Image (cartoon, rainbow, N blue to C red):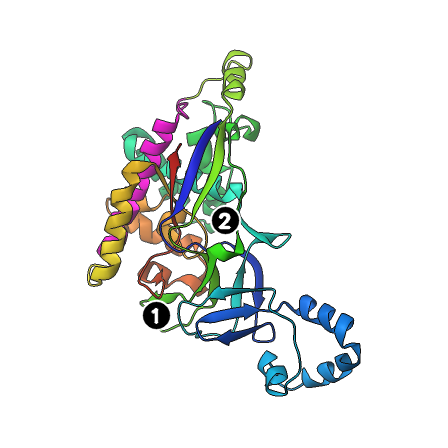
Amino acid sequence: MLKFSLEILSPVHIGSGERITNWEYVIEGNRLKVYPYEYLISWFMNTNQAFLQNLRALMQDPNYSLYTLIDRNIKIPEPLYELPLRSSLQVREVELFIKSLGMPYIPGSELKGALRTAYMGGLLLADKELRESIRRRLRQKINNKRELEKFGSKGKGFEENFFNPVENADAKYDLFKAIAFPDLFFELRDLCVEVPKIIGSDKSLYACESIKVGTRLEGKLLIERSLIDRMLRVEKLNYKHLDLSWDRLKELSNSFYSLVLDLEMEFFRNMPEVRTHLQEVKRRMEEGILLRIGKHQGYLSTTIMAVFKKEDPELFERVYDASVSQSRKEKPKTRRISSKNLTFGWVLIKRV
């Protein structure tokens, strides 16, 4: 069990799948005050039940919002919570951060998934033979979208080359089963509302609850060495890649994200503020394991294809075209940044 601290280097949004509209928030100055619908109705049930019929009528107005009640001097409760608003909203809906019993948290699966992708990317960069094998298999499947999707699906296809014993694709022997992160809970006061911008498009994005830059959390990384020993000694399995030490995870993860950061800096070559931010993220990676999590990471951070982007751009383009829906075809040429010109999702895990 390894104790670690996690530092937020840029805004992080991990969505619950829910959004609120101005039926459920008001903005005062640079604060967004949140009144979830169930919370508001429950309050009226307890304090002004007679008004509920009028409220239902008011809600039929297409221009209805919480400001309607405020303008009519109708008493409403204190907000359930309120957050700093980093910029003016471009779209009225706000995406909520994932929460349990009202407390926001980073799912351990989010951290493990990011580490898993970075581990694969790092191995590809370090192992030319493995890289060429994956490249050949990608080219064989490039003209069959269904086969390509199957090859790239989680726990199947190419992933067995990184995590499974030689000539054994059974998912129960996946090496990363020995790794577990806890869910990391934190306080609502550590959230703010970011308003992402798309560089390379005029499209407006939803604002989103995000963890503030500089927030620090603590957790424990479990590397279950007894499970690995059992698979080696009892099951007699033969793994080509076996080292799950902290130093090896750091080496591979940071190798992959160093490449991603270089590609991002190339994209933002005409935006010095963003480049400076990315250079600082890259500088900090020597302190621990760099990961990128949450929404607005982009294609390069969530797949291994960054490894092929420069040395085989034609393969990169063909895999992207075959694997991404038509509605998203513009995205490799766009990036999401915050109102303060920070890219999203960077966190640093340091051993303590």
Rounded to the nearest angstrom, the CA distance separating label 1 from label 2 is 30 Å
Query: Local crowd at mark 2 within 10 Å, few (<14), some, or many (≥20)?
Result: few
Is residue 257 located in the magenta-colored stretch of the structure? yes
- Quarter of the image for the C terminus: give it: top left
- Closer to the camera, 43 or 142? 43
Where 134 falls versus 333 (above or below)?
above
Label 1 vs 2, first from the N-terminus: 2
The rendered magenta stretch, by its main secondary structure, is classed as helix
Residue at horizontal 28%, vertical 43%? 284
- Asked if disc 1 and disc 2 are in contact, CB closer than 8 Å, the reply is no
Q: Residue at x 29, y 35 (%)?
A: 125
Q: Nearer the viewer, residue 325 or 92?
A: 92
Give the magenta part as a residue range: 240-267
Q: Which mark is residue 347?
A: none
Residue to which mark 1 is pinned: 201
Looking at the rendered structure, which numbered label has been put on residue 146? 2
Q: Is residue 126 left or right of residue 349?
A: left
In the picture, measured across the screen, residue 46 lies left or right of residue 301, that is right
Q: What is the crowding at mark 1: few (fewer than 14 residues within 10 Å), some, or many (at least 20)?
A: few
Which residue sits furthest top? 233
Q: Secondary structure at mark 2?
A: helix
Amino acid carrying mark 1 in the image? Ser
Q: Position of residue 266 (x, y in %)?
A: 22, 55
